[in-house]
């Protein structure tokens, strides 16, 4: 299964109010939003209230752009500034409070770090399945292709922003 990184929006059709987010795995993130909304546990209280009033059929999940994982915050911030979503609780992407950061850090203490390489998992530097030269070469080629795609996506998002302002 391929994981797609990108920026998305959730739209309430009757009110046209929006939520903008980003994820390294859009499919999984959409599922997470749906699950939280269905179980009345979504972190955005405004989005949850609107969902409770209008129901699931009046909401659409839409991908705004695909990008590399390192560019997610940049593109999400651009989309937030261009769209000005009503359901977002923070005016910037991934701005966590120092308390939230500390809580996450404490929760991770003592757990082994799993890094994914291709379809193989390894524990930090002690990888049991190191990359071959061919895999490294393919990774380099894929990175070059992603950079090229990212540039075209940045250009498209810039034009999208200009259209909305003009």
Image (cartoon, grey):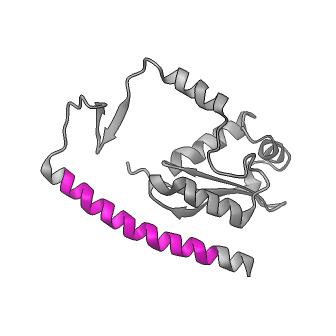
**What residue occupies the far front of the structure in this picture?**
98
Identify which residue, 73 or 21, lies in the foreground: 73
Measured as percent of width and height from the top left, residue 117 is found at: 29, 42
Res 120 quadrant in image: top left
| Quarter the C terminus occupies | bottom right
Quarter residue 94 falls in = top right
Can residue 4 be seen by looking at this rendering? no
Residue 59 screen position, x and y as percent = 73, 55
Q: Is residue 34 visible?
A: yes
Is residue 10 highlighted in magenta? no
Q: Is residue 143 magenta?
A: yes
Q: Is residue 152 left or right of residue 18?
A: left
Q: Residue at x 74, y 53 (%)?
A: 57
Residue 10 x %, y %? 69, 55
Residue that appears at 63% across and 75% down? 160
Q: Examine the image and state in which quarter residue 77 appears.
A: bottom right
Q: Say whether residue 99 is left or right of residue 106.
A: right
Residue under the image location 73 percent in, 77 percent down: 165
Q: Main secondary structure of the magenta part?
A: helix
- Seen at 24% across and 28% down, the residue is 126
The region drawn magenta spans 136-160
Q: Which residue occupies the foreground of this view, 2 or 125?
A: 125
């Amino acid at each position: 299964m391929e994981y797609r990184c990108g920026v998305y929006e959730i739209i309430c059709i009757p009110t046209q109010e929006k939520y903008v987010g980003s994820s390294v795995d859009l499919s999984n993130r959409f599922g997470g939003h749906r699950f939280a909304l269905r179980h009345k546990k979504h972190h955005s209280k405004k989005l949850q209230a609107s969902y409770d009033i209008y129901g699931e059929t009046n909401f659409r999940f839409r991908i705004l752009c695909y990008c590399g994982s390192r560019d997610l915050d940049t593109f999400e911030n651009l989309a937030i500034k261009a769209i000005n979503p009503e359901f977002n609780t923070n005016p910037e992407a991934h701005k966590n409070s120092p308390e939230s950061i500390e809580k996450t850090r404490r929760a991770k203490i003592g757990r082994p770090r799993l890094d994914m390489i291709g379809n193989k998992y390894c524990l930090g530097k002690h990888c049991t399945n190191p990359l071959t030269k061919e895999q490294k070469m393919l990774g380099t080629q894929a990175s070059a292709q992603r950079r090229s795609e990212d540039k075209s996506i940045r250009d498209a998002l810039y034009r999208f922003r200009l259209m909305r302002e003009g």
